[in-house]
Amino acid sequence: MIAEIVAIGTELLMGQIANGDAQYLSRRLQSLGISVYHHQVVGDNPQRMREALTLALSRSDVVITTGGLGPTQDDLSKEIVAELFGLPMAFDEASWAAIDAYFARTGRTCTLNNRKQAMFAQGATILPNECGTAPGCMICHEGRIVVQLPGPPTEMADMFDKQVYGRLAAQTGGCIASRYVRIYGLGESQVAQMCASWIDASDGVTVAPYCQTGECQLRVTARGQTETEALARVQPVVTALCGVLGDAVYAVTERSEETPQEIIGQMLVERGLTVATAESCTGGLVAAKLVDYPGISASLKEAHVTYANEAKVRYCGVKPETLEACGAVSEQTAREMAQGLREASGADIAVATTGIAGPSGGTKEKPVGLVYVACADARGVQVCRLTLGGSRARIRELSALRALHMIRRSALASR
């Protein structure tokens, strides 16, 4: 089956919001073995919506729309699909009652224009909205399936997962399963060269590289009648790739969107390890990333933003003479920051960052992008010197990622 996603909303075209709905739906459709060939984005204009939907229905088995289900005059997604299929609109009393009840629960008054949201193409399967006011619907007509979902991401995802996924699964007769090999410390070209024999293979298991800030991924995908069957084809390839890439692989995940901080936070908590952070150029970014993992309070003992030299002395025990002789941005200062913080906090692992994130402040000897990241544990202190390019945000992001992965390696060594 071929699917197409049509996102409706002028706010998407104007760049006010990003089209995260299409990204989410593409991932979920992939797991069903449904191929997504096209994405469209169209504003709240009846004629352009009609053109976009006509084109989608001409080339796709499944068309999923997001947005255009609201109570205002420009919310015409359902009306236009009904028109294209030659179906009359019908009022659904149960949906109207649910909308009215939602307003009552939230302490608001339901106005008459909300009745529009209870109108559907005749014969549509109505999809109640458990998170908002706009119900969706699913229409099967002359060999085509149209699924109409609300635009807000929480409402869209809840409705798709609970009410649409199973219905589509029943029609595909199979599924696709994927695993994501997560790689840190190797560039995309290097990964592609090392794994070329699998990337170029055509034995029914697809290996596709993807690069993002600070890491590479290999998506390993296979089709089967069941998820178990598909995974049985995926796993030997994952094992082989991990063998070639060695300790550059930091995780194999079911979802590509799992973040390094979630993976590392879980590792710390499961191993009962504690961590403390002292940050200068990253300004608390390492700690903020760790806090993304729920339950990190069991491991994160304390975090300091030690921009000023006085703070490095007070909280980390950096010697004033070290700062005088070597400067704040130096291997020696980073080492003393991590070691001193570990001793003062009692944490199993302490990390420290100090550097020049720019755009100004650099010198010939210490240019913008020079960063030292130190990690102290029971084995001693490791210091990494980074020379990074790009914006201030990129330098801070890459420095924080290096700190996280130094924590990960320390945690692995603590076994």
Image (tube, rainbow, N blue to C red):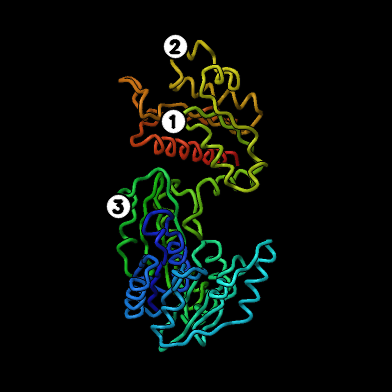
> Residue at coordinates 62% horizontally, 76% vertically from top-left?
96
Q: Is residue 177 above or below residue 215?
A: below
Tell me the amino acid under the disc marked 3: Gln
Q: Does 52 appear above or below 347?
A: below
User: For this view, does 189 lie left or right of residue 300?
Assistant: left
Name the element at disc 3: helix
Determine whether, in the image, residue 55 is placed left or right of residue 150.
Answer: left
Secondary element under disc 1, as helix, strand or loop, is strand
Q: Residue at x 42, y 56 (%)?
A: 18
- Give residue 273's quadrant in the image: top right
- Can you identify the residue that label 2 sits on? 325
- Residue at screen point 39% across, 80% down: 61
Label located before the other in sequence (2 or 3): 3
Q: Are marks 2 and 3 in contact (CB under 8 Å)?
A: no
Q: Residues within 10 Å of mark 3 (few under 14, many from 20)?
A: few
Q: Position of residue 271 (x, y in %)?
A: 64, 44
In this view, the residue in front, 307 or 58, is 58
Of tags 2 and 1, which is closer to the observer?
Answer: 2
Callout 2: SS: helix
Viewer-nearest of discs 2 and 3: 2
Residue annotated with mark 3: 193
Q: In the visual, does 190 lie left or right of 384?
A: left
Few, some or many residues within 10 Å of mark 2 (<14, 14–19, 20+): few
Name the residue at the front extreme: 112
The answer to whether residue 96 is above or below residue 210 is: below
Mark 1, Cα crowd under 10 Å, few <14 / some 14-19 / many 20+, is some
Residue type, numbered disc 2: Ala
- Distance from disc 2 to disc 3, alpha carbons, whole Å, reads 44 Å
- Picture coordinates of residue 284, whole percent (x, y): 53, 34
Q: Which mark is on residue 384?
A: 1
Q: Position of residue 30 (x, y in %)?
A: 44, 69
